[in-house]
Image (cartoon, grey):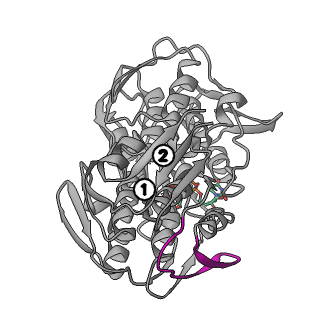
């Protein structure tokens, strides 16, 4: 397993170009299954999760090719509607092929993703919605076996999600796009990545209204066609690099991104004392004093994103006072806390709440990355550490979600080296 060796005392400053969003690219790749004619997707980040999904889709007989940040897909030769456990278990987003396969081919067999480090993450809402659309769902031997009603087509329905689910909303709008009749969905997720998917479906010929709101209406069409589409910028990657500036009295300019995507995060950065400036496709964060403490609670969009909780916490660790963080989305998303403590942080966790008393500096230490976003908080904390070297283990987590991470960090002044296993 590769490791990062990071020397502390960095001031994180400079320019960084943001990649396409992992959390948008994965559903957009799954949506390609819906199209009868070839689709081309641009701005696809080169990440392990993307490779996994491409492998999964190729395994169905679909011709899918990647050249740089562009992926093309032709579904004409599909000969299987099956997603095996060996691939699904490495990446939960694989469940997103279920809706498209079921809607277009009337059947699918997809492994259940199982639990993951940050929480149990069930998919009951996805399955309930498919059943409401007339599908027969059986869960056997760890697999979801789904069959469309007689005639091979799902039927539009009215469905209210019990909770806001990003993956659930994505799976169901893809299925509804090819269903017979109209589907009215309530309590939909409004994340920018859901909006990106809905926009691509529209470009493929889907009829969707209410995009970006909690209530979406999808009028099913008989066929969808390929299109050319570009993945939205990664708001979490953007926020992660800007967070580095706040931890090191730095100055970071993120390019190829959009301030529209991360209002709740930028508001908190401002409350912490950063000066935020932005244009249509760039955001800059600059700060020249110790950050101020803040209180945050993670919520579905447009609330504060759970995927920025660990990075925000790392800033709070250095703030001039006490911050309170409440994690509302996942039950086990504080695994970075013991690791941040190894770097000198003062954090107390009680259930969903973390109380963070700011310290003046982190101190270098060997630490272990525990999940994707948590790993970025540790990298930034190690770079901000007063002095010494920190060895970060299990960085395969960070490779799942941050494209070209060490080069981008080096460009911002971080002294980082990858130690190959
Ligand atoms: C979630 C986050 C998303 C983040 C991603 C990766 C939210 C609302 N979602 O998306 O921002 O990018 O993790 O960290 O912030 N749930 C069920 N049954 C279901 C589906 C979900 O109980 O069928 C629960 C989950 O356990 C979780 C919550 O609903 O507590 C949100 O889950 P969901 O949005 O589906 O997860 P992701 O799509 O992975």
What residue do we see at 53% from left, 30% from top? 53
Q: Secondary structure at mark 2?
A: helix
Q: Nearer the viewer, residue 362 or 339?
A: 362
Residue 312 image offset from top left, x and y in percent: 46, 69
Residue 198 image offset from top left, x and y in percent: 38, 46
Quarter of the image that includes the N terminus: top right
Disc 2 + disc 1, Cβ < 8 Å: yes
Label annotation for residue 278? none
Residue 345 within the segment the image draws in magenta:
yes
Quarter of the image that includes the C terminus: top right
Q: Relative to residue 370, is residue 200 depicted above or below?
A: above
Q: Relative to residue 335, is residue 281 depicted above or below?
A: above
Residue 298 within the segment the image draws in magenta:
no
Asked if residue 188 can be seen in this view, the reply is no
Residue 40 image offset from top left, x and y in percent: 32, 26
Question: Mark 1: is the Cβ under 8 angstroms from ligand 1?
Answer: no
Q: Which residue is mark 2?
A: 173
What residue do we see at 60% from left, 44% from top? 133
Mark 2–mark 1 Cα distance, whole angstroms, equals 9 Å
What residue do we see at 33% from left, 65% from top? 245
**Quarter assignment of residue 119:** bottom right
Q: Secondary structure at mark 1?
A: strand
Residue 43 image offset from top left, x and y in percent: 31, 36
**Mark 2 Cα shell of 10 Å, populated few (<14), some (14-19), many (≥20):** many
Label annotation for residue 216? 1
Q: Is residue 105 left or right of residue 145?
A: left
Q: Relative to residue 353, is residue 173 depicted above or below?
A: above
Q: Which residues are magenta?
A: 344-363
Q: Residue furthest right?
A: 141
Mark count: 2
């Amino acid at each position: 397993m590769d490791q990062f060796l990071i020397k502390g005392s960095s001031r994180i400053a400079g320019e960084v170009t943001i990649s396409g969003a992992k959390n948008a690219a994965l559903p957009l790749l799954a949506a390609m299954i819906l199209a009868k004619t070839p689709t081309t997707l641009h701005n696809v980040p080169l990440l392990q999760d993307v490779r996994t999904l491409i492998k999964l889709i190729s395994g169905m007989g679909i011709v899918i090719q990647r050249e740089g940040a562009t992926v093309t897909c032709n579904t004409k030769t599909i000969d299987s509607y099956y997603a095996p456990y060996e691939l699904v278990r490495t990446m939960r987003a694989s469940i997103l092929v279920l809706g498209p396969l079921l809607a277009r081919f009337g059947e699918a067999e997809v492994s259940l993703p199982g639990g993951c480090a940050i929480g149990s993450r069930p998919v009951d809402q996805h399955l309930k919605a498919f059943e409401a659309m007339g599908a027969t769902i059986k869960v056997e031997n760890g697999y979801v076996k789904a069959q469309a009603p007689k005639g091979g087509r799902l039927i539009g329905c009215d469905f209210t999600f019990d909770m806001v689910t990003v993956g659930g909303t994505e799976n169901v709008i893809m299925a509804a796009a090819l269903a017979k009749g109209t589907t009215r969905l309530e309590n939909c997720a409004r994340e920018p990545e859901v909006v990106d998917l809905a926009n691509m479906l529209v470009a493929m010929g889907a009829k969707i209204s209410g995009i970006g709101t909690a209530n979406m209406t999808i009028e099913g069409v008989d066929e969808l066609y390929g299109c050319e589409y570009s993945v939205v910028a990664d708001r979490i990657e953007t926020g992660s690099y800007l967070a580095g500036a706040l931890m090191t009295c730095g100055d970071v300019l993120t390019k190829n991104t959009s301030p529209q995507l991360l209002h709740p995060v930028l508001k908190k950065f401002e409350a912490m004392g950063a000066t935020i400036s932005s244009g249509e496709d760039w955001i800059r964060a600059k700060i020249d004093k110790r950050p101020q403490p803040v209180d945050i609670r993670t919520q579905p969009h447009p609330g504060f994103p759970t995927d920025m909780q660990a990075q925000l916490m790392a800033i709070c660790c250095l703030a001039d006072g006490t911050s309170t963080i409440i994690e509302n989305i996942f039950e086990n998303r504080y695994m970075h806390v013991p690791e941040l403590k190894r770097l000198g942080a003062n954090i107390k966790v009680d259930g969903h709440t973390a109380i963070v008393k700011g310290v003046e500096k982190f101190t270098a230490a060997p630490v272990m990355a525990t999940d994707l976003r948590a790993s970025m908080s540790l990298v930034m904390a190690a770079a901000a550490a007063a002095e010494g070297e920190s060895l970060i283990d299990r960085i395969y987590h960070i490779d799942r979600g941050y494209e070209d991470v060490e080069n981008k960090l080096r460009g911002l002044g971080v002294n980082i080296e990858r130690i190959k296993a």
